[in-house]
Image (cartoon, coloured by chain):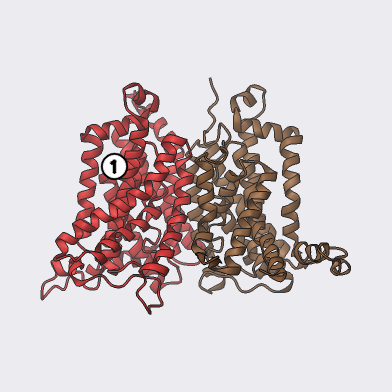
Chain colours: A red, B brown
Amino acid sequence: MDKMPAWADATLVPLISLFLAAVLSAFVIMAIGENPIEALMLMVDGTLMRSSGWGYMLYYATNFMFTGLAVAVAFHARLFNIGGEGQALIGGLGVALVCLYIPWPHWSLAIIGASVGAALFGAAWAYIPAVLQAKRGSHIVITTIMFNFIAAAVLNYVLVNVLRPKGAQEPATGFFPDATALPSFFDMFATEGSRLFRNSPANITFFLALAACVAVWVLIWHTRLGYQIRAFGERESAAKYAGINPVRITVIAMLISGGLAGMMAINTTMGEAERLILNATEGAGFIGIAVALMGRSHPFGILLAALLFGFLYQGGAELALWTNIPRELIVVIQALVILFTGALDNMVRMPLERIFLVMRRTN
Amino acid sequence: MDLVQLIQVADSTLRLSTPLLLACLAGLFSERAGIFDIGLEGKMLAAAFFSAGIAALTGSVWIGLLAGIGASLVMSAIHGLASITFRGNQLISGVAINFLASGITVLVAQAWFRQGGRTPSLEGPERFGSINLPFAEALSGVPLIGPIYSEILSGHTLLVYVALLLVPASWWVLYRTRFGLRLRAVGEAPEAVDTAGVSVIGLRFAAVAICGVLCGLAGAYLATGQQAGFVKEMTAGRGFIALAALIFAKWRPWYALGACLLFGLLQAVAIQFQNIDIGGFIIPVQFMDALPYILTVVILAGFVGKAIPPRAGGEPYVKER
């Protein structure tokens, strides 16, 4: 018998963790001599009270949904993919090659091509760590960390020596052709009177991310492969006994994970910058870890957690603009969320379980 | 490459290897006791900032060093609490510590100094000065041995020599003391240590604390020895290179020295020469940057001698009832 009902595990534990992270963050803000209430008001004001604030929040959330889903799929197979950052970097390379070298007639075709490119490149970057884990037993956490650094070096080399237009100083590709420009929320939702989402980067990739959430939900809970992934993650020996090939599941789960991480690059590279720059990911690959942990590896939870982190990111930019609190506050909050929802999970869970046991006994 | 360049490269190899070596030995103690630590980077970063920051405020590098070690120990305590006391995932805890350090250092730096996340430049007694080894002047004229002794080995800061001495010291502690035997045992078979009546939790916390002190030295060296002050993200992946070196060294102290010198050499060569031209074939600087990571993946894959981690590494210990 479970010590705690499923709803409590899915909602109470993450909420309490989030509350603890928020309280500690408030202390941090006070310790550097600022007012946490005012800071929160400023974040809300700059994010939720303006349509361009929403535009930025949803843009960031799009990135975090992809990377969060990537980490979650690997989590279901009990694999910890820290390599989302590198996979997204290489995914960006895929997007850039597809956009630069294929003459697309229309963006609707280009986004399909770019999705394939991004997913293939991201998956390819996850493939080697996956095979090394499955066949040679090298720890996937270490290899994916190493592959993050190797990806940064590869991208640096390609941008400086291969894809940089002649005469350009900056290590970046040339701008993509106009036909590949994705419609932004401003193009889609603004009217003459409303000017909704003006000057904000949110674009149609957001809906692609929502579709990815649905696809992952179907995959994990409504397909044979998803069942095998979960069974493998739950108990490897039992899965083996049931005829599930561990090498195959490890590799497939990591390919899906890498592909999802790579697809994040559609949003940053094709949707916003419209060219490939160095460090296009800006750490979004790592935020995926926090998002997946908070969202309990469930696509709906990931959607909510991605929106929360989108809010924090846009709000953090506002704080950096108007107060003496640097953007790095968000990194601290992110660290606290990872700490409480991931590593210190038992600290929150154990007292809760005790409370539920006592309640059950008294009933 | 002429002799002057060779000496320069050797000199900066030693300089660049030092933080790697200190962090690598830190990871060695922790992982030998069964606690995986991918938070070396964060501990170094926290120590780098607090050593430089406190040194700037108090004017003493020694108080700075203590503050750096203290900051690193706080991070270690969090890691210990999460992974030993609450039996959480050690890898996730390490990731959290890296982000925590990366955010807190800039936040506090901005609040204290208002210079965009850096400390003021350290001068005079606020940093570690270079030490000339005895007879360095007198021996400099002797061919071969002279330049090696006076130009390469002499003239570094105190922490460089501390790091080098810590290699035999670590070996002695791990392989010649009762504490070292127990520490290694707790990373291989904690249940056996527990049966013998020795506290698994106590040993693991001790190992994590040693790791904190050594990471503190590594960070303090970066900010107050190698460079004059803290800048944002100044560890720049060194904690992960140290982790790579640890695997490369197969969790052994003397091998760790070799691995760290090798990775330090790679960095020194990359800084000195940028793109290297070998008979018309150009090795790009990015390849040199990535080489430590590539080598580690090759070693991990077991193609060149298999690296086997401590058996109980990463597993929280649950006492049987």
Q: Does the rendering let one see residue B242?
A: yes
**Horizontal side, residue B146 vs residue B296: left or right:** right
Is B317 situated above or below B216? above
| Above/below status of A359 relative to B227 | above
Instruction: Give residue A67's position: percent from left, percent from top.
Output: 33, 51
Q: Chain of mark 1?
A: A
The residue sitting at 65% across, 60% down in the picture is B220
Secondary element under disc 1, as helix, strand or loop, is: loop
Between A32 and A132, the one lying in front of the other is A132
Q: Residues within 10 Å of mark 1 (few under 14, many from 20)?
A: many
Residue A35 horizontal/vertical position (percent): 44, 65
For residue B86, above or below residue B153: above
**Percent x, y for residue B229?**
62, 69
Q: Residue furthest bottom?
A: A167
- Name the residue nearer the viewer: A285 or B137: B137
The quadrant holding residue A351 is top left
Residue A25 in view (yes/no):
no
Q: Which residue is mark 1?
A: A298
Residue at image location 33% in from the left, 52% down from the top: A122
**What residue type is disc 1 on?**
His
The residue sitting at 39% across, 36% down in the picture is: A78
